[in-house]
Amino acid sequence: MAADHYFSAQPSGELVARPLTVTLAGREVTLQTAGGVFSPGGLDIGTGVLLGHVPPPPTSGDLLDLGCGWGPIALTLALESPRATVWAVDINERARELTRRNAELLGLDNVRVAAPDEVPEDIRFMTIWSNPPIRIGKNELHGMLDAWLPRLREAADAWLVVARNLGSDSLQRWMEDRYRGELAVSRYATNKGFRVLRVRNRSGLTGPITTITG
């Protein structure tokens, strides 16, 4: 694999933006995309599965899009929860720039674009939505999840979409073992070769975790 990936901090080459028309939160919008970020040609299948299967986000508080790319998840969260603060986090500076531009194009003032180390450590999230970068490798992926999943608020959920052929089931088992007693992990939905995994902070948990298959 080449050294320059969508999860590189500084993609090589100049940022050359081009228009991209997609539907987010039930609205057709025209945004900007560019090479050097994840899925620059449009909404990828996994993100589409995530957005189509998770419940509506909390209406207020701090919400996190982990690995924002050009912004489809963060923008959806911001459109659906205008009173919430949406943190769009990515190591890739080009992805952050595109997400920032796209939030401005949509007139969204509740999106905070940040590198991972720019998010205040005391913030706890009402939800986390993510199409995580599986291809960075297990050690890096596990480290990323270790850094962010424990920052869920009491009884709050994280929603992760992972392709079955890229290890969704093994990742679920790892999280179950890793966070046993702290976070409840379940498979919430299956569609188009992807799993949507639900990770809930067990603090304040009073009922069963809903699981949907199919």
Image (cartoon, helix red, strand yellow):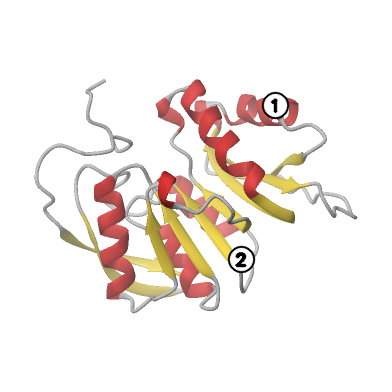
Q: Quadrant of the N terminus?
A: top left
Query: Looking at the picture, which amino acid does disc 2 mark?
Result: Pro
Residue in view at x 41 percent, y 27 percent: 136
Q: In the displayed structure, would residue 71 be above or below residue 26?
A: above
Residue 102 on image: x %, y %: 29, 66
Picture quadrant where residue 196 is located: top right
Query: Looking at the picture, which amino acid does disc 1 mark?
Result: Arg
**How much space separates mark 2 and mark 1, taking CA atoms?**
25 Å
Residue 28 on image: x %, y %: 35, 74
Picture quadrant where residue 137 is located: top left
Q: Quadrant of the C terminus?
A: top right
Residue bearing the label numbered 2: 57
Residue in view at x 29 percent, y 73 percent: 104
Q: How many neighbours does mark 1 have within 10 angstroms: few (below 14), some (14-19), or many (20 or more)?
A: few
Q: Earlier in the sequence, mark 2 or mark 1?
A: 2
Residue in view at x 51 percent, y 48 percent: 130
